[in-house]
Image (tube, rainbow, N blue to C red):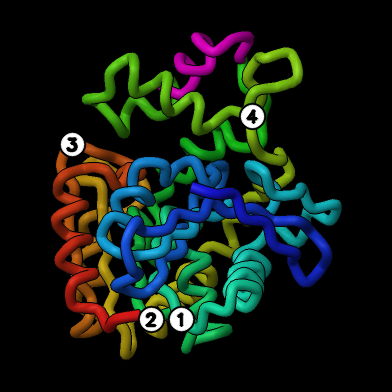
């Protein structure tokens, strides 16, 4: 893995973890886009595995997260801005088309990208996100996003991760929580963990706007699903993407495949056996690079 930095159109330095296959490239590049408070490290398991299948994999940290610059204008923390940043990444690297793998917010960015630059998205994987988002999941995320974490050392960082994510990963071990803490927090100058995102990224929409947002997102999803393959994943105990919404997504277009990942909530880490099987089958029928 190598670190790659590119410059956004409005002057920010943005970061991606760049994974190259050991042999020749056999398939389209894959661009991985993480969730709201997450960063490129979330794909530390998935990206090397996907690269082993012959794909170049770029795991991005959206502006305001990880090694990407914080935006001095927080109003630009929105899916259309993030989508334009991905287009600039592709232009910088000379990538005409890519497979987009979007987790949570990353899936919304993927849908927006297919709207503003449809040719650039050859196929898409949406990880535990859809056009309708359950209110209980939004409330859970709102309870911690944008607030200070009660963390004083790496042990308490792991405990914090378990407290806010325990419902989603009932089978996680202590080692798993420690690893998730290293993905969630950065190491500060004193060696202690600090949240690895700008607290200004979270700006909840007013309730009265939610019906319009859902209508808008269904339009974006139908556009994404028209004329390109889409794999929609759902954690079987997710509080963000309901089974009913996943089923409706599966009837939107012939190219949409749906898979439920057992004993996982929001969101699958993409290292689960069910995910790897579904992904390998999905990638195998896509056009070559």
Give the mark nearer the N terminus: 1 vs 3: 1
Which element type, helix, strand or loop, lies under badge 4? Answer: strand
Contact between labelled residues 2 and 4, with CB atoms less than 8 Å apart: no
Using residue 134 as the reference point, say whether residue 60 is left or right of it. right
Give the mark nearer the N terminus: 4 vs 1: 1
Give the mark nearer the N terminus: 4 vs 3: 4
Which element type, helix, strand or loop, lies under badge 3? Answer: loop
Question: Could you give the CA–CA distance between mark 2 and mark 1, rounded to whole angstroms?
Answer: 6 Å
Q: Which residue is mark 2?
A: 122
Which element type, helix, strand or loop, lies under badge 2? Answer: strand
Q: Residue 237: x, y in percent?
A: 23, 41
**Mark 4 or 2, closer to the camera:** 2
Q: Is residue 152 magenta?
A: yes
Foreground of the two, 43 or 199: 43
Q: Which residue is mark 1?
A: 97
Which element type, helix, strand or loop, lies under badge 1? Answer: loop
Q: Residue at x 53, y 72 (%)?
A: 212
Contact between labelled residues 3 and 4, with CB atoms less than 8 Å apart: no
Q: Crowding near pointer 2: few (<14 within 10 Å), some, many (20+)?
A: many
Contact between labelled residues 1 and 2, with CB atoms less than 8 Å apart: yes
**Mark 4 or 3, closer to the camera:** 4
Question: Could you give the CA–CA distance between mark 1 and mark 3, rounded to whole angstroms?
Answer: 34 Å
Task: Give me the disc on residue 195.
Answer: 4
**Mark 1 or 3, closer to the camera:** 1
Q: Crowding near pointer 4: few (<14 within 10 Å), some, many (20+)?
A: many
Using residue 1 as the reference point, say whether residue 286 is left or right of it. left
Foreground of the two, 39 or 22: 22
Foreground of the two, 210 or 233: 233
Q: Which residue is mark 3?
A: 263
Q: Residue at x 27, y 79 (%)?
A: 229
Contact between labelled residues 3 and 1, with CB atoms less than 8 Å apart: no
Give the mark nearer the N terminus: 4 vs 2: 2
């Amino acid at each position: 893995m190598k670190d790659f930095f590119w410059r956004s159109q409005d002057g920010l330095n943005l970061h991606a973890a760049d994974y190259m296959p050991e042999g020749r490239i056999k398939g389209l590049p894959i661009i991985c886009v993480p969730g709201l408070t997450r960063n490129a490290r979330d794909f530390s398991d998935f990206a090397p595995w996907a690269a082993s299948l012959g794909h170049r994999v770029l795991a991005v940290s959206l502006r305001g997260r990880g090694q990407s610059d914080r935006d001095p204008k927080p109003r630009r923390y929105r899916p259309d801005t993030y989508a334009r940043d991905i287009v600039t990444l592709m232009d910088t690297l000379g990538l005409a088309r890519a497979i987009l793998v979007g987790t949570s917010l990353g899936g919304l960015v993927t849908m927006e990208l297919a709207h503003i630059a449809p040719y650039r998205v050859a196929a898409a994987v949406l990880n535990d996100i859809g056009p309708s988002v359950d209110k209980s999941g939004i409330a859970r995320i709102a309870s911690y996003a944008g607030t200070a974490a009660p963390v004083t050392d790496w042990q308490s960082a792991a405990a914090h991760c378990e407290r806010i994510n325990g419902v989603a990963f009932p089978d996680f071990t202590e080692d798993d929580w420690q690893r998730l803490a290293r993905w969630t927090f950065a190491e500060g100058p004193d060696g202690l963990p600090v949240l690895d995102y700008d607290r200004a990224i979270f700006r909840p929409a007013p309730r009265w706007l939610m019906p319009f947002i859902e209508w808008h997102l269904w339009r974006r999803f139908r556009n994404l699903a028209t004329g390109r393959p889409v794999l929609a994943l759902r954690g079987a105990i997710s509080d963000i993407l309901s089974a009913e919404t996943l089923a409706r997504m599966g009837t939107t277009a012939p190219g949409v495949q749906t898979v439920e990942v057992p004993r996982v909530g929001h969101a699958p880490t993409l290292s689960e056996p069910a995910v790897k099987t579904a992904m390998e089958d999905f990638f195998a029928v896509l056009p070559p690079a």
